[in-house]
Amino acid sequence: MEELGIGFVPFSPLGAGFLTGKIDANTKFEAGDFRGQVPRFTPEANKANYALVEVVKRVAEREGATPAQVALAWVLAQKPWIVPIPGTSKLRNLQSNVGATRVSFTASEVQELGASAAAIKIEGDRLPQRALDMTGVEAPPKR
């Protein structure tokens, strides 16, 4: 891909807001919020998956950044042709997300964050089954 100059745009690089650190086991989603129907956002899954947020928060404290900025900077650090495009409807979040470009990691820090994330078993599918069925993309194997 890189040789062809083709980019890659990660879907929901902030995990539909989860990696911002503002969603936990006590979060209640408003009627109409799709996350209320996503298996990964059940209170039980949020509680189990929060370990990933804790890893990101530790790095954010060390870097003087927000968890969202760290998550986006980590994606940016993977390859120059990977471009995260987080969705937001709030200007303040957009401005904060742009701050991810000021966070830089060494190769070993990228590897360390990736290894820490990979060691966490993520609970719940990323979308409801009917949405996964419409994509035609197979679900990744459970870790």
Image (cartoon, grey):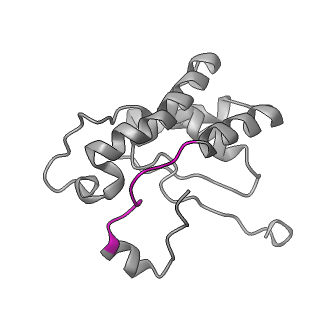
Indicate the quadrant containing the C terminus: top left, top right, bottom left or bottom right: bottom right
For residue 103, what is the image quadrant?
Answer: top right
Residue drawn 39% across and 49% down? 16
Task: Name the quarter where the N terminus is drawn.
Answer: bottom right
Determine the residue located farthest toward the right in the rendered image: 3
Foreground: 95 or 63?
Answer: 63
Q: Nearer the viewer, residue 118 or 113?
A: 118
Q: Is residue 89 above or below residue 141?
A: above
Q: Nearer the viewer, residue 25 or 63?
A: 25
Q: Could you say where residue 7 lies in the image, as x and y percent from the top left? A: 70, 64
Is 125 within the magenta?
yes
Q: Identify the residue at image location x=32%, y=57%.
A: 39
- Visible residue check, residue 90: no
Total tally of numbered discs in the picture? 0
Q: Magenta stretch?
A: 120-129
In this rendering, would 81 be left or right of 14?
right
Residue 108 place in picture, x, y as percent = 81, 33
Magenta-span inclusion, residue 92: no
Tell me where residue 132 appears, x and y as whole percent: 40, 73
Residue 60 appearing in the image: yes
- Residue drawn at the location 64% of the way across and 46% of the way down: 75
Q: Quadrant of residue 119?
A: top right
Task: Please name the residue shown 62% across and 46% down the image.
Answer: 118
Q: Main secondary structure of the magenta part?
A: loop
In the image, is residue 139 above or below residue 101?
below
Question: 104 or 19, which lies in front?
Answer: 19
Q: Is residue 79 left or right of residue 54?
A: right
Q: Where does the image place residue 67, in percent across and percent down from the top left?
A: 51, 30
